[in-house]
Image (cartoon, grey):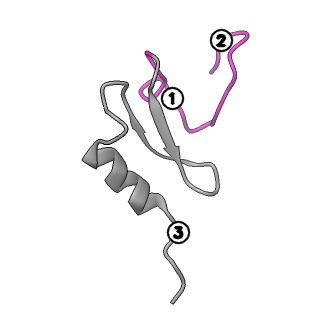
């Protein structure tokens, strides 16, 4: 539940994944559902973050 004046990005974001500092990252799928979240200590070039992004991308049609 968001506090008064807070914007709710996704109903899937709970206390565990709520940002605690700038640069907190939430990864959502094309339906807007939370797939993963990463603390501000995870860098944009992190292998773990990039693998999660790659895994969340739609598979190309063959």
* Mark 2 closeness class: few <14, some 14–19, many ≥20 residues within 10 Å: few
Q: Nearer the viewer, residue 13 or 48?
A: 48
The reply, left or right, for residue 51 in relation to residue 15 is left
Residue 51 is situated, as x and y percent measured from the top left of the image, at 33, 55
Residue 14 - label? 1
Mark 3 or mark 1, earlier in chain:
1
Instruction: Relative to 45, say whether 55 is above or below.
Output: below
Residue 7 is situated, as x and y percent measured from the top left of the image, at 69, 22
Q: Which residues are magenta?
A: 1-21
Mark-to-mark CA distance, 3 and 1: 25 Å
- Picture quadrant where residue 13 is located: top right
Task: Kindly check if marks 1 and 2 are in contact, taking CB atoms under 8 A apart as contact.
Answer: no
Residue at the extreme front of the image, as rendered: 45
Q: Could you tell me which residue is drawn at 46 percent across and 59 percent down? A: 56
Q: Nearer the viewer, residue 12 or 56?
A: 56
Mark 3 or mark 2, earlier in chain:
2
Label 1 secondary element: loop
Residue 60 is situated, as x and y percent measured from the top left of the image, at 51, 78
Mark-to-mark CA distance, 1 and 2: 12 Å
* Mark 1 closeness class: few <14, some 14–19, many ≥20 residues within 10 Å: few
Residue 23 is situated, as x and y percent measured from the top left of the image, at 45, 25
Give the residue at mark 2: 3
Give the residue at mark 3: 58
Mark-to-mark CA distance, 3 and 2: 34 Å
The reply, left or right, for residue 9 in relation to residue 18 is right
């Amino acid at each position: 539940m968001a506090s008064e004046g807070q914007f709710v990005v996704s109903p899937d974001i709970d206390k565990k994944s709520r940002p605690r500092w700038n640069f907190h990252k939430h990864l959502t799928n094309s339906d807007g559902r939370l797939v993963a979240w990463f603390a501000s200590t995870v860098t944009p070039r992190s292998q773990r973050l990039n693998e999660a992004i790659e895994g969340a991308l739609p598979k190309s049609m063959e």
